[in-house]
Amino acid sequence: MSNSARLHIYWQEWQGKLETIITTRSARLLYPAVKQIARDDTSKTYGLSHPVCILHAPQKASATRRAKRMHILIDGTFRLEEASDHPCLKHASCNITLFDPVDLDDGSLNLVLIDALHFDVESPEREGARRRFHPFFHVQRGISHDEADIKSVFSQATRLDIDQIRVDQSAKDSIGHPYLRIPTPQLDLFSVMTMVAADCFCNAGDAEAEARSGRTTPKAADTNIEALFVSLLQLLTQSTNVVRETDTAQMLTRRVIDKQWMSAGHWYPEWS
């Protein structure tokens, strides 16, 4: 089976597991198709037909914070070597944008930007000055979608006309410094969706704070959320995940094993 076919099958496996977790907190998922967007002699690049859209995601799964809801966009790409076995993922990118949804009296929706991050998964084979001093895996602040794309996907998700959707990006220049590249593990599209599932839908937070608030979040046993999240983690890490590991990840593993300790310095191409 080709790597592209494996990616399409794996992408569909994710929809059911992710949607089950999201609906436990009364949120809604608009899930796109994965499609080829570019190719060269040895590889193909895949993206999404539109960003993953999550409506009414709680800021946190706890009872004290679940009332505050967000709309979330997650987008990303993968570049796969078509003829190789694991690791065939050579480069990936991902971004997440968070909005505070405000329903206006005229029936329109105002999306107020809260935060935006993008994640890069780079290959040590990439040459040139652009890669120097970049951690191979890193996260930076910065918005990745223009207003037209944002309106389009939320129109589809909410069934509002595009002219009924407003986007307030006035915070984009003040949400944080955009040039700090923070070393991370491999945070591709699947990893970032896992992160959102954990923090927004599963993590109930501080039990003592919950008790002081007078409200309680249902226990994991009551909602089965822990079992659902474990199932998602198993899917993320199993061998059917064609983008589970890059050659960069294998190189970083060797660096750590060779030194028998882990440092952020290992993430930079200048380290030896």
Image (cartoon, rainbow, N blue to C red):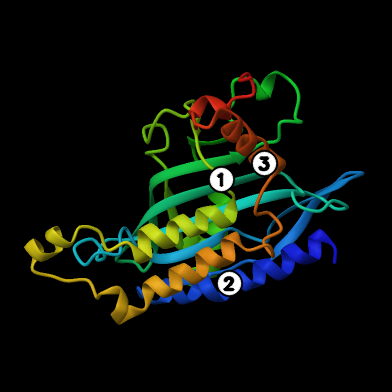
Look at mark 3 in the image and give the residue it sits on.
250
Disc 2 residue type? Gln
Circle 1 Cα neighbour tier, 10 Å, few/some/many (<14 / 14–19 / ≥20): few
| Quarter of the picture holding the C terminus | top right
Circle 2 Cα neighbour tier, 10 Å, few/some/many (<14 / 14–19 / ≥20): some
Disc 1 residue type? Asp
Foreground: 58 or 204?
204
Between the residue at mark 1 and the residue at mark 3, the CA separation in whole angstroms equals: 35 Å
Nearest to N terminus: mark 3 or mark 2: 2
Q: Is residue 89 above or below residue 123?
A: below
Q: Are marks 1 and 3 in contact (CB under 8 Å)?
A: no
Tell me the tag on residue 15: 2
Please give the name of the residue rendered at 15% of the width and 63% of the height, measured from the top-left corner.
Answer: 210
Tell me the tag on residue 102: none
Is residue 88 left or right of 264 when viewed as pictured?
right
Q: Is residue 82 above or below residue 143?
A: below
Answer yes or no: is residue 191 visible: yes
Look at mark 1 in the image and give the residue it sits on.
146
Is residue 118 left or right of 222 when viewed as pictured?
right
Answer yes or no: is residue 161 visible: no
Circle 3 Cα neighbour tier, 10 Å, few/some/many (<14 / 14–19 / ≥20): few
| In the image, farthest residue toward the bottom | 222
Between the residue at mark 3 and the residue at mark 2, the CA separation in whole angstroms equals: 28 Å
